[in-house]
Image (cartoon, rainbow, N blue to C red):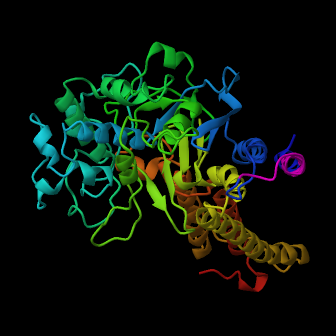
Amino acid sequence: MTGAGIARCGFLAIVLASLSMPAGSEDGSASNAALIAALEAAVPAALVRHDVPGAAVAMVRGGEVVWEGAFGIADMDGRTPVTIDTVFEAASVAKPVTTWTVLRLAEQGLLDLDAPIETYISDWSLPPSEFDHTQVTARRLLAHAAGTNFGGDPGVEPGETVPTLREAADGAVLEGGPIQVSFSPDKAYRYSSKGYALLEMAVEEITGIPFPEYARREILEPLGMRSSGFEWTPELRDRAATGHDWFGNPLPHYEHATSAPGGLQTTAGDLARFLAAGMTGPSGEPRGRDVISPGAVTETFTPYPFTDDETLIGLGYNLDISTGVLVGRKSGDHRGFKPIVFTIPDLGAALVILTNSDRAAAGAFADIACPWSQLLQGDPLRPLCGQLYLIRNTHWGLAAFLFAVGSWVGSRPVIDWAKGTRGPINRVRSWRGLVVAALLFVVVAWWGFWYTDIPLGLLGYPPTFYTVRFDPWPTAFVWVSWAFTCLVLAMVLRVIFPKIDQTNET
C-alpha cells in the first residue's frame, strides 16, 4: 500500500474511533483509543514517506504507560520485524536519565550541584582557559550552561580499542577534541555532550563504581526499566535493532567511551516508564517515584536563568511553554539511530519515538507526534509543529519555484533548436565552455556539501551524513536539491546552445 493509501486508511480509522469511542478525558483531550488510532495511522505513513526501516513508539496517559507499538523492520538484512521488546540506542535521550542519576546523588548528600565539578574529579582537570573553571558546576553542566565545548562521542568500530573515559576527555575519540571551557559559564545555552562526560567522571569518583552500574542500581531498576542499560549486555544485544545509514545500509553498534551523554540502550516502553515517573501516577504516586523527590523533578522542568540568553532549557530537557502548557522535549542522534521524547507533565501525557535510520529527522517525528498532539487539550506541540510544517512547505514551495524557473530557462533553447535558430558552441576554447564547467562544478559542490560526509569529514568528524541531518525536513529538501540541479542544467543547456547569430565566440 502506498503512503497516501496508508494515510487515508489511517484517517478513516481516526474518524471511526472518534465515533465509536468515548469523547475524551475530563481535560478535553481525546480518548486513549483515539490517540492510539492516530499513532497507528501516522507511524506507518511516516516510515514510508521518509524511507525509515522501523520504529517503536510508546504513549503515557494519566502518568502511566498505556500503549506500546512496533512498526517496520529492525534489521533490513534479516527482515527482522520491530517488536515492543526491540532495543534501540537512545543517544542523547539518555541525558534526562543521567540527570536523574546526578540529582539522586545530590539528594543523597554526596554531590553539591553548585560546587565546581572539578571538586569531584581528582585525577583529571580541565585544560587552562581564559574562563573561571570554578563556575563549571553540575547544575550548569546539566543545563548546558557551563560553557563547555560542542561535540559528542561518535564511537569506534566494533573490535577496535575503546579509549578510557579519561582518554576520551583528553580528545581520544570526542568530536572537536578534548573537553574544555570554550565560553563564559552561565551566560548562554551552549549544547555540550562533553559536559555530561564530566558528570560521568564525577559520579564514578563519588560512588567508586562505574556509571552504568550506579545508574542501573539507583534509577533503572527502581523504575522498572528492565530492558535498559548504559552498557551493552548479551541480553540487550540479542534484542537490538540495527541502525541504518541514509542509503539504508546496515551499520554496526559502535563502541562508546562515554556512557552518561548518550550511552543508554532501551525500549520505547522503558523510556515511557521513565517519563511517567516524572508525573503524578494514576493512583497518586508522587513525581519521582521516590527515586528523586518531586522537588527535584520540578527542577528538571524549570527554565535555567541564563544571563544573556532566553533559550528555554531545563535540566536534561528542552522546554516549551508557548501554549501555556509546559512541554519537555529531548532528541538524540547516533549513527543509524534517531530517537525523540515529548513529555507534558501537567497533562500526564508523553510520547516516545525510537527509530533505526539516519533518515529519521525532525520531519519524520513531526509526522508522528503532531497528529497525536492535535488530539490533546490545547494541542501542546502546535508551535513546534507549525515551525516544522512551515519549513516543509517552504522547501516544497522553493522546489516548485526552482523547477518552474528551470523549465522556463531550459525550454527556450529546446524550442529555438527545433526551429534551427540555435546551435552548439563551435569552439572548444569558447568562454562558454568555462561557464559550463563552472555551472557543473556548482551542481557537484551542492550535492557534495549536502549529501556526502566530505565537509565535516575534513574537520575530523566520522562518516555519518552529519550535514544533511541538520536540515529538519531532509526528505523535502531533496526536492529543493533536484530543482536546483534542474535550474543549473537548464542554464548549461542555454549556454551550450546559443542563438545562431551569437556564435561568434572569441
For the point 41% across and 43% down, the residue is: 96
Mark count:
0
Horizontally, is 298 left or right of 139 in the view? right
From this viewpoint, is residue 357 visible? no
Give the main secondary structure of the magenta stretch: helix
Q: Nearer the viewer, residue 362 or 310?
A: 310
Across and down, in percent, residue 241 comes to: 58, 26
Q: Which residues are magenta?
A: 9-25
For the point 82% across and 48% down, the residue is: 22
1 lies above or below 132: above
From this viewpoint, is residue 420 visible? yes
Across and down, in percent, residue 447 comes to: 57, 56
For the point 74% across and 53% down, the residue is: 30
Quarter location, residue 154: top left
Q: Nearer the viewer, residue 140 or 110?
A: 110
For the point 23% across and 36% down, the residue is: 108
Please check the rendered image and state whether residue 20 is part of the magenta-colored stretch, yes or no.
yes
Across and down, in percent, residue 324 comes to: 55, 68
Please check the rendered image and state whether residue 86 is part of the magenta-colored stretch, yes or no.
no
Quarter location, residue 84: top right
Horizontally, is 313 left or right of 139 in the view? right
Viewport quadrant of the C terminus: bottom right
